[in-house]
Amino acid sequence: MGSLPAPSYLMNVEKQQKLDESTLLNLFKSQQRYLNYFFQHLNHSQTLKFTQILLNSKGTIFFTGVGKSGFVAQKISQTLVSLGIRSGFLSPVDALHGDIGILTQNDVVVLFSKSGNSEELIKLAPCAKAKGAYLIGVTSNEANNLLGFCDLNVHLPLERELCPFDLAPVTSTAIQMVFGDTIAIALMAARNLSREQYASNHPAGKIGKSLIFKVKDVMKKQPELPVCKEGDLIMDQLVELTSGGCGCLLVIDDNYHLIGTFTDGDLRRNT
């Protein structure tokens, strides 16, 4: 009976591709430089006007985009929702097949696009405009086809993509995310959102448990308590000790009065 061949990933080790540490470090430095270019050239007047419009919106703030910009638009919309701001993502494709019916003249539509020339957005823009919505283009190309449809255009300065071909949208989406999330926090501050209000929108997870729930909300009630008598055999209580999820047993007397505890640590130390 022969031995099994070595896994392929252990063979031809010398052929595995490697990345030089200095190359990786230079990429991070380049990305930092491109992000700094964005911060240094961002038009603060445009940004303030954009923020004021969102802050004073009487309707819903819809975000839309195609491809990677669409993912960013969805994320920013979800961030606003978590702050208690009416927001939603409007798929540019689905919008043209009925979803645009949700728009009203009180709504704002924010169109994220690196080029401002995405065919799907160009088709959506005049239709959204016809519904009376206020349109804002957020682009990195100052001369773009969305300009003619939007009430406001915010320019996100982009020196170039980190991609060696200047094609893959990695820097442009990074600045879109930074821009959108910063605006979200600006709205949070302007609305004087309290810690308690923020927590009320996050009832699950660490945030909610630390700021909303009281002990009475998460404690085990009497019927659920893992209890035993001091005369019980340890072996007989192992299942109760390990399956209750508490890590301990409450030792009670015949009147159900607590007289002590027995923990899993006690078990390890005494066995």
Image (cartoon, rainbow, N blue to C red):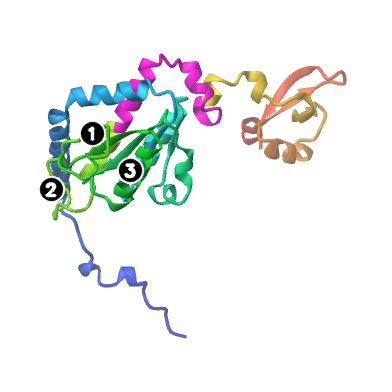
Q: Is residue 123 left or right of residue 166?
A: right
207 or 133, nearer to the observer: 133
Q: What amino acid type should be assigned to the residue bearing mark 1?
A: Asn
Q: Is residue 183 rendered magenta in the image?
A: yes
The residue at the point 17 percent across, 51 percent down is 163
Q: CA distance from mark 3 to mark 1?
A: 15 Å
Q: Main secondary structure of the magenta part?
A: helix
Identify whether 50 is placed above or below 18: above
- Of the two numbered discs 2 and 3 on the same chain, state the one appearing first in sequence: 2
- Of the two numbered discs 1 and 2 on the same chain, state the one appearing first in sequence: 2
- Of the two numbered discs 3 and 1 on the same chain, state the one appearing first in sequence: 3
Residue 218, position in %: x, y?
65, 25
Going by the picture, which residue comes out furthest to the right?
254
Q: Which residue is mark 1?
A: 153
Closer to the camera: disc 2 or disc 3?
A: 3
The residue at the point 27 percent across, 32 percent down is 151
Identify whether 116 is placed above or below 212: below
Q: Which residue is mark 2?
A: 22
226 or 116, nearer to the observer: 116
Magenta span of residues: 180-207
Closer to the camera: disc 1 or disc 2?
A: 1
92 or 189, nearer to the observer: 92
Closer to the camera: disc 3 or disc 1?
A: 3
Task: Give the image quarter of residue 141.
Answer: top left
Q: What amino acid type should be assigned to the residue bearing mark 3?
A: Pro
Q: CA distance from mark 2 to mark 3?
A: 49 Å
Q: Which residue is mark 3?
A: 126
Q: Is residue 98 left or right of residue 166?
A: right
The residue at the point 36 percent across, 16 percent down is 190
Q: Secondary structure at mark 2?
A: helix
